[in-house]
Amino acid sequence: MPENEKKQSKKLWGGRFCAATSNLVERFTASEHFDRRLYSQDIDGSIAHAKMLARCGIISDEDAKKIISGLREIETLIENGEFQWKPELEDCHMNIEKHLTDLIGEAGGRLHTARSRNDQVATDMRMYVRDQIHVVDRLLYGLQNAFIHQAGSYMGLIMPGFTHLQKAQPVLYSHHMLAYFEMFKRDRLRLRDCLARVNVCPLGSAALAGTGYPIDRYLTARELGFQEVSVNSLDAVSDRDFILEFVFILSTIMMHLSRLSEELVLWSSAEFSFVELPDDFCTGSSIMPQKKNPDVPELVRGKTGRVYGHLVSLFTMMKGLPLAYNRDLQEDKEALFDALDTTIGSLEVMQSLIQGMKPIAERMEADTRTGFITATDLADYLVRKGIPFRQAHEIVGKAVARCIESGKELTDLAISDLQELHPAIEKDVLDILDVRGSVDSRKCPGGTATGAVERQLEEAKSWMQRFRL
Ligand code: ARG
């Protein structure tokens, strides 16, 4: 037999071809080296499909049994690393199906009845994303707990709050920690929302137009744990919105992690010295012996761009596609997998980093004594004495300018100096200039007063109990 024909006969779709695929094309189109990640979803999907085919009388019960036990055997082979993946069989679907036929003979050839790789891969991807949504959710849960722990352990600790990276007003460290809790809470809510759209079963859409076999789509959907079946076969085989949505959520998680990383880099610097990062999560310099570098948060910040890149790749991949399936769609996988691996890895390290982080209380508190951090409180004090806010703002601005000139802080001014600014100022102003007084005056819901933050923390804990995907 000539070499070409021998090769051609190996293809599951080789019937209409006169020549074997060029090696170059085989290499170029193969995806088994990355889509083998979908093997367990693919096998579960095929088992559900085979069961349904038998239940509907499309294949015999005996064939279905052979298919199911053959697929389980293949699953074990793959899990033990004994399965021989072949690039010339293109993808994981063909690799598994071909091996099945080699294993059980003719019955294996009946599995693909009333199915196409187009609805098969769409189903696998939805099952995979569904599983991974739960993985990411659990990691976010762990990270949120780390913030709850930080907030609870250091309740009352005051630090400068910043706008424009300039000292603005004093806040509680716990308040700052719980701000991150809120970001990751929104990410988890987004995951739940996304899950509803992911959990729709495309199986039965076949190549693009549905199938004439008397299949039961509800049966396979139920068997695979899907909430609904897709409504339009053309849309179902070509839709990858669910991947885009998921990668958007991953991008948002990374953006949040990156903002956190940026703060950790700043805070752990000698200039800030707000936190001590755990030694086992920092690295040294090959030349400068004194260095303890925050490489972990820096890498998380750096990897964020990579996840955004995948999101843009996916959008670009989709934008020119006519209905229905096009091979471009195969490019969804590496983008998704890498975005996922990057986010999972980042979440894992960040949880440990936050757990092990120690605030340096003296430095944080000392830093609230400079930078005129209670200037707004002084203006508010004047407002309470009946002075319009704009005028109060102006008066305090002048006081700050005077302090800058003389190298003083507002708290260094004598009561007589302050009274020169405005006669309405009395002795009680001293409480106002105190950072703790400032913090504890901000009692409104969502404010930084100790009581308000304690309530916030209780609410966070109870949300953690209540929220389930
Ligand atoms: N490996 C392909 C993918 O991921 C599977 C579907 C192939 N379908 C086809 N008509 N060539 O998209």
Image: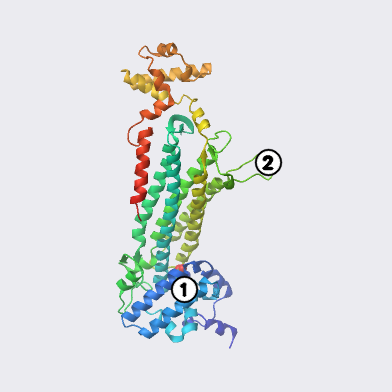
Q: Position of residue 275 (x, y in %)?
A: 53, 38
- Please say if 240 is above or below 426: below
Circle 1 sits on which residue?
A: 93
Q: Which mark is residue 289?
A: 2
Q: Is residue 138 left or right of residue 79?
A: left
- Residue at left 58%, top 47%? 280
Q: Name, please, the residue furthest toward the bottom.
A: 1
Mark nearest the camera among 2 and 1 is: 2
- Residue at left 49%, top 46%? 355
Kindly identify the amino acid type of the residue bearing the numbered disc 1: His
Q: Position of residue 403 (x, y in %)?
A: 49, 18
Is residue 416 or residue 336 the one in the foreground? 416
Q: Position of residue 345 (x, y in %)?
A: 51, 54
The quarter of the rendering in which ligand 1 is drawn is bottom left
Way the structure is coloured: rainbow
Instruction: Give the alpha-carbon distance from disc 2 to disc 1, as whole Å.
Output: 53 Å
**Label 1 crowding class (10 Å Cα cut-off): few <14, some 14-19, many 20+?**
many
- Please say if 170 is above or below 142: above
Q: Is residue 334 left or right of residue 182?
A: right
The quadrant the N terminus occupies is bottom right
Secondary structure at numbered mark 1: helix
The quadrant the C terminus occupies is bottom left
- Residue at left 54%, top 77%? 21
The answer to whether mark 1 is within 8 Å of ligand 1 is yes
- Please say if 269 is above or below 36: above
